[in-house]
Image (cartoon, rainbow, N blue to C red):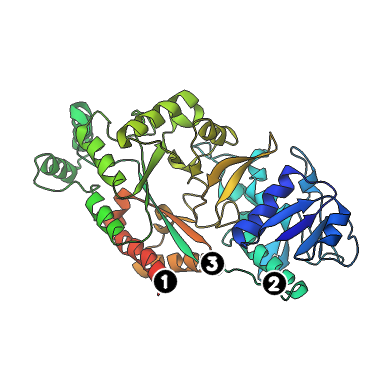
Amino acid sequence: MLLIYSYKITPRLKFVFKQICTRILNIPVSFTSKIEEFIAHENLKLSYGSQPLGSEFFVKSNGLLFEQGLSDLNLNVQSWDDTKCFFSSGEKSMIPFDIFSASFYLLSRYEEYLPHVKDSYGRFTKDESLGFKHQFLHQPVIDIWAYKFQDALKTHFPKYEFKIRKFSLNPVIDVPVAYYFKNKGLLRTLGETLSDLFSLRFKFIYDRFSVLFGLKKDPYDNFNWIINRQRVSSIKFNVFFLIGNFNTYDKNNSTNKKQFISLIKSIADYCTVGIKASYMALDSLAILKSEKQLMDGIINTDTTTVRSSFSKINLPSTYRNYIDLEIYSDYTMGYADTIGFRAGTCTPFLFYDLDYEIQTPLKIYPYQLMDFSLLKYTSFLDKKETLLNAISEVKKVNGLFTFVFHNYALSSIPRWSDFKSLFNIILETNNEISK
């Protein structure tokens, strides 16, 4: 056990030390503000504050973990070996940066509470992030810092045996539209047919009616393939269905269609099924509650996992609404168009509410890659190389690679022709580790 001494034990301090020490490094921690208890402890220990007590393992604090609310921070990002860090800690500290304050800044999404320019969907973009501006978005910097901290501990406590975590995968399949042509009702089918007619998209008309008359398979209907992949995989897939009402942003099939309900039930027999919260639900607890109740009824159990439409998060209201409805796992933290680490980590972490200064029970699973981010690469080899590079960053820290593929990305539509192979390549990386 690692004993941490600080003159003041705050919720921020406990939150970030548990994340780095326990969740990343597998070191149990406890806290004390009593000097005599700290001195008497004969195992791993460190002091955290403005000055060391003596010759103990000491990390100098920049003060962020003892503050409340938001303040105007001076962030001087500097190079540290092959990565970047901020909050320099000076000569007396055993490590050159206050990685705990820096990690808290990234994990709490401090920067998303500050004034920033949103995109057309009202989202925080990569261009506004510290990681993008200082070119460390591509690295799980918190996990890298944690291992640097562990190396320093090994030097100071050479007899302690540190546990090693293993690289693993966390597949996410997003289903905003289950079927391209099927199960859309007479009015939607008629409207889309007329739109194709006026746009001279005659092939779409031919394909639509071939599917509706059972002559061809719906191009988005790849669910048997997903189930077959799940059957031979030791990793549980997380599948998120959009079941909200039809609107400008959300255009999935209606839950009034029995075939759609049967599809969700059949997927739930093999995979973990969650809600893809509709765009309108992000601003309305009542709408979100109705969607959760609907999904609870479909799969006959409490739905506890969620992803937001368009990867949009309104902090802190979105996460507070999830907690109010006893949803405890979120898979939204990432950038849809960019490969990287939005919260600076590939390790799941609990949402810290900066307004209330409390650690909440909502666990955030940040994703590093969405299928859309690979579309800008024209060749399969470029897509594969980019994908493997992203996986490599997570493997370096034995982390959790979370990736999001949409059901239609697993279709034979020319735009997505490479993505079944890419999905299989990701799954094979886990088999390589387990051999």
Question: Which sits earlier in the primary sequence, circle 1 or circle 3?
Answer: 3
Which residue corresponds to the image point at 55% horizontal and 36% vertical from the top-left?
319
Query: Helix, strand or loop at disc 3?
Result: loop
- Residue 277 pos. (x, y %): 43, 35
Label pair 2/3, CB-CB below 8 angstroms: no
Which residue corresponds to the image point at 58% horizontal and 56% vertical from the top-left?
345
Name the residue that disc number 1 marks. Answer: 434
Name the residue that disc number 2 marks. Answer: 160
Query: Helix, strand or loop at disc 2?
Result: loop
- Residue 261 pos. (x, y %): 25, 35
Residue projecting furthest to the top: 286
Name the residue that disc number 3 marks. Answer: 398
| 160 sits to left or right of 418 | right
Q: Which circle, 2 or 3, is nearer the viewer?
A: 2
Query: Helix, strand or loop at disc 1?
Result: helix
Amino acid type at mark 1 = Ser
In this rendered view, identify the residue nearer to me: 324 or 335.
Answer: 324
- Residue 429 pos. (x, y %): 41, 69
Q: Label 2, label 1: how many angstroms apart (C-alpha)? A: 27 Å
Q: Label 2, label 3: how many angstroms apart (C-alpha)? A: 20 Å
- In this picture, is 431 found above or below 174? below
| 82 sits to left or right of 232 | right
- In this picture, is 246 found above or below 125? above
In terms of image quadrants, where is residue 136? bottom right
